[in-house]
């Protein structure tokens, strides 16, 4: 499973990229507004930090302008993935951009029917929003299961399922069990994945027991290796 971070905060992106665990970045207009930076400059900087796909979303909703914006955003860097909404105009834009060789992430997907359309439009990624479905009492992870099952029925569909609106590690683990290709998570959730109280407890014990040995690994000479 690939891990993307869902943020426009460069400090977080740099920090997580340094772990070697980050495969890409997703942004959206709300995250860009929060970052308070010039959009083009921001995406260019993110693309330099992370070599994997970096989603940059169009701002318009009509086909002609979305296409112009998508083509413009794609010129920022080769790893830009143009993000378009799952609307008829967004799907039409996706088809044209995909045929031109641009990676497209079709976002705001809330049904399996919409996901089928994204695949048929040649999207590189479809983004079903699990958290927002859970928020209205629907089954977000159930949608992931449906989409993965449908895509698996059609090997010609090359669209990757990019699980979005993730709120907790269970969303990540369950999506991985279902075979979703990508999880995009807020930085807090990526960091949460490493946490377990027994890890903390066990490490405290090892540190305390090691101190009792009175030893220091780096001050001990290594054995000669027969040279
Ligand atoms: O970037 C799309 C998606 O991940 C947004 O998540 O938490 O705003 O529902 P959220």
Image: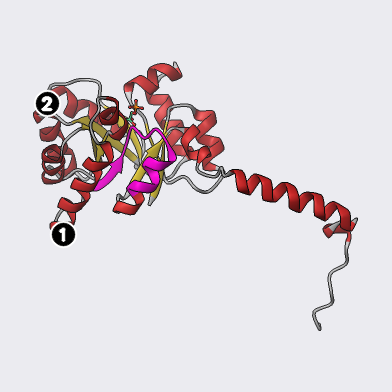
Look at 46% across and 41% down and name the residue there.
Answer: 50
Q: Per the image, is 163 magenta?
A: yes
Left or right placement of residue 196 versus residue 156 in this view: right
Look at 20% across and 20% down and name the residue there.
Answer: 60
The CA span between labels 1 and 2 is 29 Å
User: Between 223 and 79, which is closer to the camera in this rendering?
Assistant: 223
Magenta residues span 160-175
Q: Mark 1 touching mark 2, by CB under 8 A?
A: no
User: Between 37 and 31, which is closer to the camera in this rendering?
Assistant: 31
Whole-percent x, y for residue 153 in the image: 13, 57
The quadrant in which residue 108 appears is top left
- Mark 1 sits on what residue? 155
Whole-percent x, y for residue 76 in the image: 35, 33
User: Between 53 and 45, which is closer to the camera in this rendering?
Assistant: 53
* Quadrant (top left, top right, bottom left, bottom right) of the C terminus: bottom right
- Which of the numbered marks, if any, corresponds to residue 63? 2
Could you classify mark 1 by the number of other residues whose Cα lies within 10 Å: few (under 14), some (14-19), or many (20 or more)?
Answer: few
User: Between 136 and 8, which is closer to the camera in this rendering?
Assistant: 136
Left or right placement of residue 35 versus residue 84 in this view: right
Whole-percent x, y for residue 150 in the image: 15, 51
Whole-percent x, y for residue 140 in the image: 26, 36
């Amino acid at each position: 499973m690939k891990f993307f971070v869902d943020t426009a905060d460069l400090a977080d992106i740099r920090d997580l990229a340094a772990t070697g665990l980050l495969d890409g970045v997703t942004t959206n207009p709300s995250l860009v507004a929060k970052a308070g930076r010039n959009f083009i400059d921001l995406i260019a900087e993110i693309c330099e930090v992370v070599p994997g796909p970096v989603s940059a979303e169009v701002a318009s909703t009509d086909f002609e302008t979305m296409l112009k914006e998508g083509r413009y955003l794609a010129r920022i860097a080769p790893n830009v993935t143009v993000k378009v909404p799952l609307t008829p105009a967004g799907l039409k834009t996706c088809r044209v951009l995909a045929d031109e060789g641009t990676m497209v992430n079709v976002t705001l997907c809330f049904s399996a029917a919409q996901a089928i359309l994204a695949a048929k439009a040649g999207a590189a990624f479809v983004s079903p929003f699990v958290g927002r479905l859970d928020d209205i009492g629907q089954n977000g992870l159930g949608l992931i299961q449906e989409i993965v099952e449908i895509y698996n029925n059609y090997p010609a569909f090359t669209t990757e399922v990019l699980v979005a609106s993730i709120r907790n590690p269970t969303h990540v683990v369950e999506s991985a069990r279902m075979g979703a290709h990508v999880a995009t998570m807020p930085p807090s959730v990526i960091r949460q994945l490493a946490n377990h109280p027994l890890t903390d407890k066990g490490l405290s014990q090892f540190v305390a027991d090691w101190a009792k040995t009175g030893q220091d690994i780096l001050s001990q000479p290594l054995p000669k290796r027969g040279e």
